[in-house]
Image (cartoon, rainbow, N blue to C red):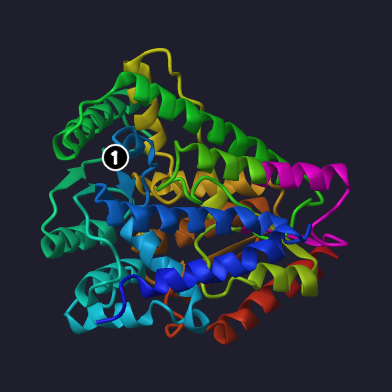
């Protein structure tokens, strides 16, 4: 049995080492928020376990405000496990993925879930949950994986049944049904936290989250500028929204991202000396291939102003009454990137992708097809047809976002390079 949370402690050491180097470099400073958020969250979870605070496994497509209202510590098991992806040269999740395979978990399951299950099976890798909350979006993988997690841990689980969204549905009735599921969630949290809902605390947490949302939306509008002022793939509320949204520390991180980009604009700085191409990465790219954006910036002058994970469709919640807050939280819970597109018809994903191309002025779309995401597989042809009408080329290739053994970067980098060269040539 390994030392308790050895990988996450190693990550903390790595972050403590990197932070001073990054924060003192103007061109790397934008990476500070993601490191700070991971560091703060790991410390929060380790402290919670030590002090016996209650932990909720919330599926990672859920914003965390409601959990903080009840002073619970949210630990989306997929996010906890995928932090390891950066360890061992990108092979950090392979041991736990293999443990799930060896226990009989089918290989087609999302590797984030396989690794989360492996964490449980091998022990000492993740703190145990006091309760589990699992909405029915975005995909079948989550539905089955959470049943397995509940079975192994023995924790009580609430499944939140999300209605179908898309064109030609009665949206008002669907929302009404969903608001009732959120009220059910509040009752579940009351029962298992032993606390009653405190309306003042609810208002306080949601107002804090509103401030973070304001910063995130303003930040996203700066990423629309041409040329792009800040390198890298940027950030959004999918970065930490599932575990820290509603805490002042999270708001500060969002403000840090905004401050950095505003400062760069004021100083006339751009992501690359000469911007030649703008890419929209409208799915999760391989987490073990993080320098792909830097590589394309340096070698091709191709920038990545928007991605699936940074595409936020949030609104500020009306906090005038408890009912308006609950309704606002319910609406927000349907907006998490990936969860939002997994609430029903493929029109949602396709319209969002087109909206991202249009508002971020992108020349091309890249869809790295994570092996687990069957719901995306079914819509690729429809998406290609719509993008063709706009004259926007699309690259699709296969990979596994968390397991480099399925398709290592050496296999798909030539495909990306060929595609980018073709886009550059056709622009010229
Ligand atoms: S939508 Fe894809 S990445 Fe997200 S949980 Fe499902 S399989 Fe995994």
Q: Nearer the viewer, residue 153 or 166?
A: 153
- Indicate the quadrant containing the N terminus: top left, top right, bottom left or bottom right: bottom left
Q: Where does residue 93 sit, x and y in percent of width and height?
A: 39, 77
Q: Residue at x 39, y 25 (%)?
A: 328
Q: Quadrant of residue 410?
A: bottom right
Q: What residue occupies the far top of the structure in this picture?
A: 320
Q: Which residue is mark 1?
A: 164
Q: Residue at x 38, y 36 (%)?
A: 65
Left or right for 46, reference 257: left
Left or right for 407, reference 295: left
Q: Nearer the viewer, residue 395 or 217?
A: 217
Quadrant of the rendered image holding ligand 1: bottom left
Q: Nearer the viewer, residue 404 or 118?
A: 118
Q: Residue at x 68, y 62 (%)?
A: 20
State the extent of the magenta-drawn residues as a range. Answer: 257-280
Q: Nearer the viewer, residue 24 or 148?
A: 24
Q: Where does residue 94 sit, x and y in percent of width and height?
A: 37, 81
Helix, strand or loop at label 1? It is loop
The local crowd at label 1, few if under 14, some if 14 to 19, many if 20 or more residues have their Cα within 10 Å, is some
Q: Is residue 177 visible?
A: yes
Left or right for 230, reference 381: right
Q: What residue occupies the far front of the structure in this picture?
A: 51
């Amino acid at each position: 049995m390994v030392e308790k949370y050895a990988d996450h402690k190693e990550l903390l050491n790595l972050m403590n080492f990197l932070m001073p180097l990054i924060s003192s470099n103007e061109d790397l400073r934008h990476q500070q928020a993601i490191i700070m958020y991971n560091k703060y969250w790991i410390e929060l979870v380790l402290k919670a376990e030590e002090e016996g605070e209650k932990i909720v496994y919330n599926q990672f497509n859920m914003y965390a405000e409601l959990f903080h209202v009840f002073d619970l510590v949210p630990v989306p098991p997929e996010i906890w496990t995928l932090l390891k992806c950066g360890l061992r040269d990108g092979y950090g999740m392979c041991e736990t993925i293999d443990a799930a395979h060896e226990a009989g978990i089918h290989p087609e399951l999302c590797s984030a879930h396989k690794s989360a299950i492996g964490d449980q099976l091998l022990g000492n890798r993740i703190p145990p949950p006091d309760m589990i909350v699992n909405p029915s979006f975005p995909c079948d993988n989550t539905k089955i994986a959470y049943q397995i997690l509940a079975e192994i841990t023995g924790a009580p689980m609430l499944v939140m049944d999300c209605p179908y969204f898309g064109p030609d549905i009665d949206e008002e009735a669907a929302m009404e049904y969903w608001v009732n599921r959120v009220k059910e969630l509040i009752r579940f949290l009351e029962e298992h936290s032993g606390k009653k809902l405190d309306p003042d605390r609810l208002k306080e947490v949601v107002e804090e989250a509103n401030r973070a949302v304001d910063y995130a939306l303003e930040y996203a509008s700066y990423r629309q500028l041409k040329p792009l002022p800040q390198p890298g793939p940027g950030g959004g509320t999918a970065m930490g929204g599932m575990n820290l949204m509603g805490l002042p520390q999270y708001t500060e991180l969002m403000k840090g991202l905004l401050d950095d980009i505003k400062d760069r604009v004021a100083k006339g700085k751009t992501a690359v000396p000469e911007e030649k191409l703008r890419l929209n990465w409208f799915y999760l790219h391989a987490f073990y291939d993080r320098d792909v954006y830097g590589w394309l910036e340096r070698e091709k002058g191709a920038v990545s102003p928007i991605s699936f994970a940074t595409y936020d469709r949030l609104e500020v919640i009306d906090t005038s009454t408890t009912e308006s807050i609950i309704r606002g939280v319910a609406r927000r819970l349907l907006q998490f990137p990936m969860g939002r597109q997994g609430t029903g018809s493929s029109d949602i994903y396709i319209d969002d992708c087109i909206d991202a191309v249009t508002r971020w002025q992108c020349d091309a779309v890249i869809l790295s097809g994570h092996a687990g995401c069957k719901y995306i597989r079914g819509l690729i042809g429809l998406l290609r047809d719509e993008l063709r009408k706009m004259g926007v080329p699309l690259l699709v290739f296969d990979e596994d976002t968390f397991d480099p053994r399925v398709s290592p970067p050496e296999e798909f980098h030539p495909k990306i390079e060929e595609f980018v060269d073709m886009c550059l040539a056709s622009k010229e």
